[in-house]
Amino acid sequence: QALNAKLSEILTEMEASYPYYNPDFMHPLPNKDKVCTINSHTQKGDRVEFSYQEHGAKVVRANLLYTLNGGARYEEWFRQPADLLPDSKVVAQLPAGTSHYFINLIDENNFLESYPEVMDMRGQARGKNPYSTMALPVK
């Protein structure tokens, strides 16, 4: 317990994010059935908006994941906070030069839901397919 407390203290100091639960994990997890679903998205210029539906767990945080070099051999992805709005909406500003993006919603039980769905390593052919092939392209 002392080691766990020390590790938590260090992670808090670094403002590191803790691991999230995967709602697509094939085995039972508490509160897995309460994860939100992302219903739709729109893009107008550099503003993107997503709508979602909660199924028992409150969405407490949202992050935009984006890349400036989608399709490149070594894509680099960045994360920035997105804004939660009333009526189950999320909005984010796309940084200049963004080529592709995802949205991540995190609920009160620490489950992470991505849109569009992010492929696992097997689906990504062990890193040979860039993540931008599944991401939303900037219009």
Image (tube, helix red, strand yellow):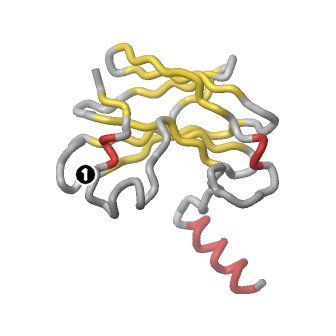
Foreground residue among 104 and 47:
104
Q: Is residue 102 found left or right of 13 in the rendered image?
A: left
Q: Is residue 21 found left or right of 16 in the rendered image?
A: right
Location of the N terminus by quadrant is bottom right
The answer to whether 38 is drawn above or below residue 19 in the figure is above
Location of the C terminus by quadrant is top left
Q: Is residue 10 found left or right of 121 in the rendered image?
A: right
Q: What is the residue that sits farthest to the left in this orientation?
A: 72
Foreground residue among 84 and 106:
106
Residue 126 position by quadrant? bottom left
- Expressed as whole percent of the image width and height from the top left, the position of residue 11 reads 58, 69
Residue lying at 69% horizontally and 43% vertically, measured from the top left: 107
Residue lying at 69% horizontally and 52% vertically, measured from the top left: 110
- Expressed as whole percent of the image width and height from the top left, the position of residue 109 reads 75, 50
- Name the amino acid, label 1: Glu
Residue lying at 37% horizontally and 37% vertically, measured from the top left: 135
- Expressed as whole percent of the image width and height from the top left, the position of residue 98 reads 27, 34
Residue placed under numbered mark 1 in the picture: 75
Residue lying at 63% horizontally and 77% vertically, measured from the top left: 7
